[in-house]
Amino acid sequence: MASQWHSLVSQKLFLAKTLLARLSSEHKAGAMQQTPAAEAEALTQGAVELMLRARQSLLVMIARHHQNKQENPGSIEALEALFPYPITEVDTLRELSETTGSWWQHLAQLELAITEPNKTRKTVTAENIIAVSADQGPDKSLQALNETLVSMTRFAREIDEQHSEW
């Protein structure tokens, strides 16, 4: 049962990789033909959404590996609450969620960025030019998204391989 969840996680990550590859090819071809901004944003947000779905499925996969056949945890806290004993994967995920630059934290920032409306910015005038901040939001570069994708894929594979040995 848990391997079916690993297949689902892998599928979502593969589809995200496919979208990022399309975005990459669009950028490379960008010298010859400019990719519309809306299309690039759609590819980026589509890849992010698939990675978020993979992250959700990863939590369920971990629960299934530990013989919890019913629950669908939506967070690290919900996963942790399912077990009366410490789970190594939960500890690892908690550490990732607290580590600056980790794939978990990057996804959390991306999720926040795509689920909330853009903040209104102050207009720049001579009086407030110093007060304007350069809040850019999370890194949505192709390189950063690919790094997160690779890290997630590696993490899911390691968990599945670890539990397959048992």
Image: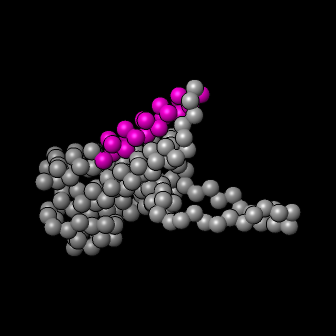
Q: Foreground residue, 27 or 88?
A: 27
**In the picture, residue 150 is in which quadrant?**
top left
Residue at the image position 51 percent from the left and 60 percent from the top: 113
SS majority, magenta: helix
Q: Is residue 150 something that shows in the picture?
A: no
Q: Foreground residue, 92 or 72?
A: 72
In the current view of this chain or complex, which residue is farthest to the top? 32
Can residue 22 be found in the magenta stretch? yes
Residue 137: x percent and y percent? 58, 57
Q: How is the image coloured?
A: one colour
Residue at the image position 17 percent from the left and 49 percent from the top: 3
What residue range appears in magenta? 12-31
Residue 101: x percent and y percent? 51, 53
> Does 97 sit left or right of 68 as displayed?
right
Quadrant of the snapshot with the N terminus = bottom left
Q: Is residue 114 something that shows in the picture?
A: yes
**In the picture, residue 31 is in which quadrant?**
top right
Can residue 99 be found in the magenta stretch? no
Residue at the image position 26 percent from the left and 63 percent from the top: 87
Q: Foreground residue, 54 or 23?
A: 23
> Does 96 sit left or right of 59 as displayed?
right
Residue 61: x percent and y percent? 23, 56
Residue at the image position 62 percent from the left and 56 percent from the top: 136
How many numbered badges does the structure rendering display?
A: 0
